[in-house]
Image (spheres, rainbow, N blue to C red):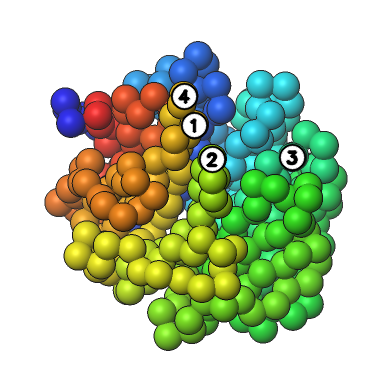
């Protein structure tokens, strides 16, 4: 690691970056977003400078944004989503203007957003909430419906859509008590084979290799688990490297097709180059880490949210 610097400064004991997202063309356009306790921020120069986006005000201040997601076809549709209290905001011009999809009272507390890898064709979006389960939109975030049949735990902490969603219609939801699977695009759910004693599940990610597909599940206090049979069985990954919480996961594909797995623990960010068997620290955090993002497959830079400090940019 060559260096670090403050990228976005957030002050106050409750200053928190909840989620980070980047344009798929970040290497060219330098565009990224940060959902924070002080609202939604955007950078158009690779994280050197950030601007606060005036999305929704509450009592004279910007409402907290709890999640943010960028369309996989952003170059064509310029679509970005942000979750705030009681609603999902949608922009189709890269964040310049926003439209709100409202939800019935009491307002849901959104925890996560997930976009179909085939969003350009199916327009499918999903949103997880703390107490109201999963909401789904099939019209690019304009209208939303609760899709909770069979979802007995409505505290949804993370979502993941299968890379082969068009063929298998599989979506996963990590909850306080375990892992749920939908095989019809999120319309109905069933409990999966993940051992309930290792819940809550805080993060989920798929990694597609040349010969196999791997599924990763990060837990609140039991580390990281890997399944190579689509969730039928699970093995713990490197308990000495990841003994506790795995709050976020990211998969990056190198130019040769090799997948690298990144994990946010309570101590910082780790990387595995061998399908989760061995891990190396990229950044050890002195302050509690809250979110991270490696915005480009080149892996030359990383953003890390730190409680009370904002976002730090690392050169890797």
Q: Nearer the viewer, residue 37 or 276?
A: 276
Q: Is residue 240 above or below residue 69?
A: below
Label 3 sits on residue? 118
Disc 3 on helix, strand or loop?
loop
The crowding category of the residue bearing disc 1, from other C-alpha atoms within 10 Å (few below 14, some 14 to 19, many at least 20), is: few
Disc assigned to residue 210 = 2
Q: Nearer the viewer, residue 128 or 255?
A: 255
Disc 4 on helix, strand or loop?
loop
User: Disc 3 versus disc 4: distance between alpha carbons?
Assistant: 21 Å
Residues at discs 4 and 1 in contact (Cβ within 8 Å): yes
Q: Who comes first in sequence, dot 3 or dot 4?
A: 3
Residue 199 position in % (x across, y down): 45, 78
Q: Give me the residue at 55% from left, 28% from top.
A: 23
Q: Who comes first in sequence, dot 1 or dot 2?
A: 2
Q: Mark 2 against mark 3, which lies toward the viewer?
A: 2
Q: Give me the residue at 35% from left, 69% from top.
A: 236
Label 4 sits on residue? 255
Residues at discs 1 and 2 in contact (Cβ within 8 Å): yes
Query: Is residue 166 rendered to the left or right of residue 82?
Result: right
Please identify the quarter of the rendering in which residue 277 is found: bottom left
Please state, as top left, top right, bottom left or bottom right, where the N terminus lies in the image. Answer: top left
Q: Give me the residue at 50% from left, 38% from top.
A: 21
The crowding category of the residue bearing disc 3, from other C-alpha atoms within 10 Å (few below 14, some 14 to 19, many at least 20), is: some
């Amino acid at each position: 690691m060559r260096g670090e610097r403050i990228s976005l400064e957030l002050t106050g004991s409750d200053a928190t970056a909840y989620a980070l997202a980047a344009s798929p063309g970040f290497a060219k356009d330098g565009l990224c977003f940060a959902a924070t306790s002080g609202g939604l921020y955007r950078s158009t120069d690779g994280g050197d400078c950030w601007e606060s986006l005036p999305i929704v005000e509450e009592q004279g201040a910007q409402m907290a944004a709890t999640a943010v997601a960028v369309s996989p076809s952003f170059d064509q549709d310029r679509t970005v989503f942000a979750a705030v209290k009681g609603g999902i905001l949608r922009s189709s011009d890269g964040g310049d203007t926003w439209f709100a999809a409202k939800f019935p009272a009491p307002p849901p507390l959104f925890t996560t957003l997930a976009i179909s890898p085939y969003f350009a064709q199916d327009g499918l979006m999903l949103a997880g909430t703390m107490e109201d389960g999963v909401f789904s939109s099939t019209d690019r975030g304009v209208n939303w419906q609760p899709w909770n049949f069979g979802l007995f735990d409505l505290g949804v902490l993370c979502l993941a859509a299968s890379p082969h969603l068009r063929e298998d219609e599989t979506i996963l939801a990590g909850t306080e008590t375990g892992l749920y699977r939908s095989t019809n695009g999120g319309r109905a759910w069933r409990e999966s084979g993940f051992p309930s004693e290792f819940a809550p599940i805080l993060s989920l990610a798929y990694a597609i290799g040349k010969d196999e597909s791997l599924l990763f599940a990060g837990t609140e206090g039991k580390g990281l688990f890997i399944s190579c049979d689509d969730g039928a069985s699970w093995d713990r990954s490197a308990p000495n490297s990841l003994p506790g919480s795995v709050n976020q996961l990211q998969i990056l594909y190198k130019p040769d097709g090799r997948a690298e797995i990144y994990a946010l623990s309570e101590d910082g960010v780790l990387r595995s180059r061998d399908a989760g068997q061995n891990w190396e620290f990229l950044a050890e955090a002195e302050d509690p880490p809250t979110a991270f993002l490696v915005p480009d497959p080149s892996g030359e830079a990383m953003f890390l949210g730190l409680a009370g400090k904002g976002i730090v940019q690392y050169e890797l």
